[in-house]
Amino acid sequence: MVDTVATEEEQPYWTAGAPSEIYAPLPGLTRCEVAIIGGGIVGLTVAERLKKAGRHVVLVENGRVGAQVTGRSTAKVTALHGLVYDDLIQKHGFDAASEYADASRGAIRYVEERTHEFSIDCDLTRSAAYTISEKGAQREAIDREVDAMQRLGLPVERVTEANSPIAFDSGVVLPDQFQFQPYRYVVGLARAVHGDSTLLHEGTRAYSIRAGSPNEVVTDHGMIKADHVVIATNLPFMDRGLFFAKASPRQHVVLAARLPDESALEGMFLNVDEPRYSFRRHQSPEGPVLILTGAGSRPGHHSASQRLSDLKRLAAERFGTTEVLGWWFNEDYDSVDRLPYVGPLTPVTPGILVATGFSAWGLTNGTASAQMLARHILGEADVTKTPFSSGRWNLRSAGRKLLDINLHVGREFVEDRGKALASWDASTLAAGEGGICRRHGRSVAAYRDSEGELHLLSPRCTHLNCYVSWNGEARTWECPCHGSVFAHDGRMIHGPAVRDMKRLD
């Protein structure tokens, strides 16, 4: 399938013009106590906690610190996660739901405390969080959620109105939550962490981990030997834990647009009627900005241009926006039972730890999971004894979801046969176009750049060989099976793949 030519460049609002440090790649063979792979909010939070405890830590990041999932978020730090608590009580029991609530509250405190401790300029602002049912389709679910959260000690209230241009039938509000500038936060956290016993290295890609004493992390700039390894890469790139089989990728398109000065919007909102969307106000020096997110979908499954167009129309018609300041795609992974997976990669690799499955609430769940990992490494708590244990499968409560995830992947492999028979000839691509095409009788992933050069790649993802799909707006290749993302030239951007797409030209 050939997608349309992008009309403008993808540009995450948070990273545009934001100051950042540059950290040199790994200098070669390195020995440390803890190696961390991934420089987002999870990796940096673990590093900060361990540095305070006097541990020798080395953190490596494939790209730039904070510029991937964390720096592309909507930046809501809250314990109100849509409609989750009633479901958690039903699936896992009251105690597990209570631990989830406590972990969220602890994450909020951590972000506030570190922001003040390190004087991080990230526009941290108190804000109320709302879950709303615009047309009333989820009124009963919201009532159950309010009851569940009040039982758990969260000070929520039912509401039917708020300072928002979107009127709604019913809702729940949780006061005294936070919103901030996520990229500035992680850049500030990185600046505080780097130095002395903790070192950060950008432009360093980890390929594999060999379990042992010590564990060995193989990167493109040498090996790291460490007693503990933390994989903080959204979805673990090591397949032994089978997390690709029990967490599913969810992609959102996010828009930043200029709000009228007189806009009444105050607070952070998630509409849980279909189609879902979330919105909040960010106060920039130039005036109020709308941060708007559309409904999530699996990567490669819906027209990127249509989703972006729909979001722009929603912003203009419902919020009166006057100028688009940036838009971008972001991705997270949903666990099958609504709880993050935190702990050892496998039962036989206790020194290799993971955190994944944040279900689109990564700033809160990621921070909470990172604190669990740090306490586990320091011997303060055993995460395997908690409801978040990475080794769980929960077939009784989540068996259907597990089946759906893996049936979907099976369907993708079947549909790959259709992609392989694509009749579109790569030579007919215009500048800026890409897609799965034919070239000299074989299937290829083809893209023609603005200079007219045709880039030909193997159409298979380097993770588990699914056929990729072309995102014509972001100019990226996306794997619909497990969510890997590659640049137009095949360079790996987002795992679980660790290898670039194979070049054919």
Image (cartoon, grey):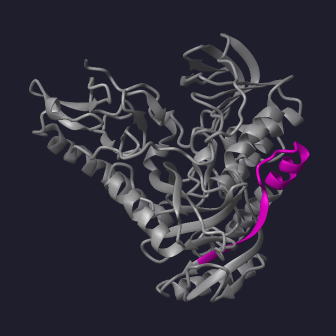
Residue 432 on the magenta span: no
Query: Which quadrant of the view contains residue 236?
Result: top right
Q: Which residues are magenta?
A: 110-131
From the top left corner, tell me how far across and down residue 181 is, in percent. Answer: 70, 51
Q: Nearer the viewer, residue 160 or 466?
A: 160
Left or right of 432? Residue 392 is right
Asked if residue 337 can be seen in this view, the reply is: no
Q: Quadrant of the N terminus?
A: top left
Q: Is residue 264 above or below residue 345?
A: below
Q: Nearer the viewer, residue 197 or 354?
A: 197
Q: Nearer the viewer, residue 30 or 213?
A: 30
From the top left corner, tell me how far across and down residue 31 is, in percent. Answer: 74, 15
| Residue at image location 61% in from the left, 54% down from the top | 340
Left or right of 132? Residue 94 is right
Q: Nearer the viewer, residue 218 or 82?
A: 82
Left or right of 184? Residue 300 is left
Residue 120 on the magenta span: yes
Asked if residue 384 can be seen in this view, the reply is: yes
| Residue at image location 57% in from the left, 40% down from the top | 68
Left or right of 260? Residue 111 is right
From the top left corner, tell me how far across and down residue 307 is, in percent. Answer: 38, 59
How many labels, in total?
Answer: 0
From the top left corner, tell me how far across and down residue 258 is, in percent. Answer: 58, 61
Q: Is residue 391 above or below residue 199?
A: below
Q: Quadrant of the C terminus?
A: top left
| Residue at image location 45% in from the left, 60% down from the top | 296
Q: Among all residues in the image, which is located at the extreme top?
A: 28
